Image: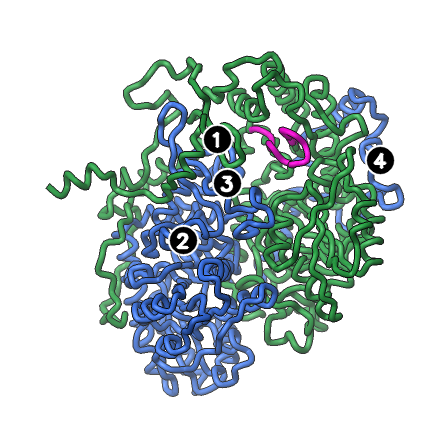
Amino acid sequence: MRYLPLNTQDRSAMLASMGAASIEDLFVDIPEEARLSGPIHGLPMHAPEMAVERHMKALASQNLVAGDVPFFMGAGAYRHHVPASVDHLIQRGEFLTAYTPYQPEIAQGTLQMLFEFQTQVARILGCDVANASMYDGSTACWEAISMARRITKRATALLSSGLHPHYVGVAKTMARFTGDALVHQAPSLTAETDIAGLIGQIDKNTSCVVVQYPDILGRVEDLSALAHAAQAAGALLIAVVTEPVALGALRSPGEMGADIVVGEGQSLGVGLQFGGPYVGLFGCKQKYVRQMPGRLCGETVDAEGKRGFVLTLSTREQHIRREKATSNICTNSGLCALAFSIHMTLLGEKGLRGLAQVNHAMAVTAAERLEKVPGVTLLNESFFNEFTLVLPKDARSIVRALADRKILGGVSLGRLYPDEAELANGLVVAVTETATVEDIEAFATNLEELLA
Amino acid sequence: MSMNNQGRPTRPAEDTGAASAMATSTGNRALMLEEALIFEIGDSNRTGVDLPEAPRAASRLGGLERKSAIGLPGLSEQETVRHYTRLSRQNYAIDLGLFPLGSCTMKHNPRLNEKMARLPGFADIHPLQPIHTVQGALAVIDELGDWLVKLTGMAGVAMSPKAGAHGELCGILAIRSALEARGDKRSVILVPESAHGTNPATAAFVGYQVEDIPAKPDGRVDVDALKARLGPDVAGVMITNPNTCGLFERDLKIISDAVHEAGGFVYCDGANFNAVVGKVRPGDLGVDAMHINLHKTFSTPHGGGGPGSGPVVFSEALAPFAPLPFVERTEDGKLALIEEESMEDHHASSFGRMVAFHGQMGMFTRALTYILSHGADGLLQVAEDAVLNANYVLRSLEDVLDAPFAAAGPCMHEALFSDNGLAEGFSTLDIAKGLIDEGFHPMTVYFPLVVHGAMLVEPTETESKAALDQFIGALRSVALRAKQGDPSLHSAPHFAPRRRLDETLAARKPVLVWTEPVVEQAEAAE
């Protein structure tokens, strides 16, 4: 077996050195009736690299690859070009095969990277501080709701109807067990968001208002009034960003007054990967830092006075506080955070703004073309790189039919909201720098044919 | 002397090291290169990417155009590659040497796994693509799930949890759902003192009271004390097996039977499954739920702190409550993804969604690649070699280091030592930092809490005898220095990129983001 260095002689010598007759002597604590005597029946035996590769490739070939076709899907996961150097660098063994930096003297590489990541994230989100990443956007969103409960000592969260339905689903699952009350309804197909309605719902029991920006239908709206209203009532504003590239063009939620900003960082560096692993972004105002979940990296000095970095404020965390911890989370999304940070460093401010501009221009171009398709209307007045079309029929069947024609033409609202019949004709379309004018034309022409 | 959060010194009182006596003008030391922060070397007007031309289009941003600077430095591609390459060289990693962190299972990460995860058919597919365009991806989830179920002897599996602690959450939510479904309000979860901190944190996070179960002097759960505590208020127990002392809980089946008898459920923390994979099936020991850290047992890379992946296997009793989504094979042989829409028909008891999309697909492809490489026979050999290596370390060092449970018999995948017998004023921390100078990552220290000054060594099965002998030699020499009271250990490490770091300072005045140095701002204002 190619990954196991011991050979038969090694094993015999080692067993002999400790006076054991056989390997079974080391497993005596497993009750004999439960101990297995050989390989588990019905499972294949070991295989050479070539055979494994053949098997995995056969499975991979059954999938329609996004990069091979005109591609317009988003709704929480976006396809962006990732520079080649990103993937090269994250495969450096010193990053890839390192552990959580609990021994800071020999983990400065990871720690400095995390400090840079935290700073980049805080600046993009418009927050004072950010943590070293969460599992993903959906779990970061729930952690933020939970954090707002701890800060405000209130347990009713208002969720915008524009919040990603999977994020709502995660929050609903958790709230059932923690006793939080969630106020939420499905979105309606209008150009306006529900911000005005949310303001009217805030009361003295509200812990937080959770709003996505841009929202699930791609709409963007100023959050300032909502932030004021929430804070005036002693509640927090939590903003959720599923497409961080948008913040290269749009004002940041922190700038508009959000107390906590969480996001999905997958757009930069990470790739689609069928939904994971991704990287949750989490930023907040300085005054709430000690209620923040997740790992934090901080600056300090070593015994010679040299600058160095360590994991810090760990008294919030489970390995110290056990049942009194702010969260049970024991990991971040280190390697994805590294990919995000490298991609962001390659872009820089100039590159991020340029990338955002290209995304927006491509999306505007696509929206203008697609709304010319007979029977199709464009829902949004404003958007970044994603917008909603209303089709004359159920969008799920159109998405499947487009896929049969080798076009991945957006995410149907029927997939996201299976129980909401009035949303069934909605189609969420994302357009990034990876789309070409030809792709847009192919999408529009095929849509025309299918709707004719 | 500054103390860290656990009351241990984080830097020496005085520096007795001589290695750093000679200064260089750059601060570099040949191949050991200092690297500034991107904020100090980058420039918001520099970029390492060339973007496609944007078509002409009017802005539709709704008047929310960003006006202020973000403050993001950019580097050219060459500078970027150099920056991160230099940073990488300040890390210890499995690729550099033995990484004996107990309970973390730092084994070799085969590169075939990386290659397979990067096949465009896995890496470049969207989670919401129509189901008929992702049959191969669903097959990976299905095939891996099938392996996990068969290796553990359980009835079902939830693939979506993002990491071990998330898997614990999944298991506890299933237990609570099952109890609620029968109208049984129970409020207490029992957790052994030696448990990972995530166990009590998880139980508390969903509203359970956590009560400790004591350990016996032999390092195992006190079964009588546990039995005595069982009753109508106990929802379940969370038990780690093999436990964090590196020992197999011989009485797990007896414990499970007693818990079931009392109407509760058994959660097993599967962090240490590597020691027993293929050797015993938790399902045969009465376990109701167990998470499996794919990044431990099945060798997906730790990545400097994630991403992990924590699928959870379930008994017949808990499987109906597993979270959405999950993959199911339909009658025509195609794979379906059961999401919210079909919940009522197929899976009315599911406790719902834990995460957006379907879990850590990139980790599934790696883990499946690893499992197929080993096969059922190779995985059995994994467990045997992991246990053999750990016992070899234990028996080779028990003459110089106190090994509290060694006399009672063999250990499983990890060898536990204590600081008992070191010279006055010398601690586990000194040994850990001394090992760094010897070119090794230290073992897990001060965990489990049930042993004073614990040192938990998990070599894993992917170390050769020669590598083990080298490590044993190094640890032996450091242990002897600590027993003889060698003061230079107090200021170790001497040869790492940094000396001991002041954790107290970091926590007292947290600096979590980079800010412009104040002096420069004042100058700029003039």
The residue beneath circle 1 is B3
- Tag 1, which chain? B
Q: In this view, does B239 lie above or below A151?
A: above
Task: Estimate how packed mark 4 is, as few (under 14), some (14 to 19) or many (20 or more) residues with alpha carbons within 10 Å.
Answer: some
Q: Residue at x 71, y 44 (%)?
A: B192
Disc 1 residue type (three-letter): Met
Real-space Cα separation, disc 3 to disc 2, in angstroms? 26 Å
The residue beneath circle 4 is A28
Residue A288's disc number? 2
What is the image's colouring?
by chain
Task: Estimate how packed mark 1 is, as few (under 14), some (14 to 19) or many (20 or more) residues with alpha carbons within 10 Å.
Answer: some
- The answer to which of B278 and A240 lies nearer the viewer is A240
Q: Main secondary structure of the magenta part?
A: loop
Q: Is residue B383 above or below residue A384?
A: above
Residue B388's disc number? none
Residue B186 is situated, as x and y percent measured from the top left of the image, at 72, 62
Give the quarter of the figure containing the C terminus of chain A: bottom left
Q: Which of marks 3 and 2 is in front?
A: 2
- Tag 3, which chain? B
Give the quarter of the figure containing the N terminus of chain A: top right
Real-space Cα separation, disc 4 to disc 3, in angstroms? 35 Å
What is the span of residues highlighted in magenta in the rendered image?
B442-457
- Tag 2, which chain? A
Q: Is there CB contact under 8 Å for labels 4 and 1? A: no
- The answer to which of A387 and B104 lies nearer the viewer is B104
Chain B: give its colour: green
The residue beneath circle 3 is B304
